[in-house]
Image (spheres, rainbow, N blue to C red):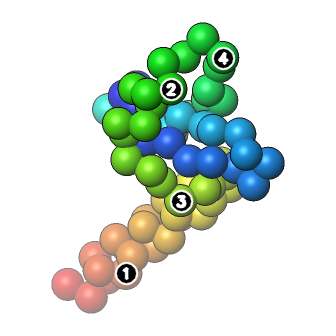
Amino acid sequence: MAPIGYFQRPNGEYVLVHRCLGCDFERFNRIAGDDNFDLVLTLPELPPRTGRDVKLQRMLQQLEVSDLAETE
């Protein structure tokens, strides 16, 4: 898992996004009080998202790939 960015939830909480280098699975981790916040801010800011958003995006990508395969 590698950190790919962060986002801020509507309640003001900051969240780190980590992505698996093998399968692209994403995990969200709240930023803790002892985390280096300046280091977090060096990562790209991402749009807020949930696990459902990521699953939906993955499903849509799979549909696009299968549609392309059918047209070839």
Q: Are marks 2 and 1 in contact (CB under 8 Å)?
A: no
Q: Quadrant of residue 30?
A: top right
Query: Which amino acid, by three-letter code, is at mark 1?
Result: Asp
What residue lies at 66% left-to-right and 17% top-to-bottom? Answer: 33
| Mark before the other along the chain sequence, 4 or 1 | 4
Query: Which amino acid, by three-letter code, is at mark 2?
Result: Phe
Looking at the image, residue 40 sits to the left or right of residue 68; the answer is right
Query: Which amino acid, by three-letter code, is at mark 4?
Result: Gly
Residue at far front of view? 38
Residue that carries the numbered disc 1 in the rendered image: 67
What residue lies at 37% left-to-right and 81% top-to-bottom? Answer: 67
Residue that carries the numbered disc 2 in the rendered image: 37
Q: Give me the C-alpha separation between circle 4 and circle 1.
A: 46 Å
Can residue 20 be seen here? The reply is: no
Residue that carries the numbered disc 3 in the rendered image: 47
Q: Give me the C-alpha separation between circle 4 and circle 3.
A: 22 Å
Q: In terms of secondary structure, where does tag 1 sit? A: helix
Q: In terms of secondary structure, where does tag 4 sit? A: loop
Residue that carries the numbered disc 4 in the rendered image: 33
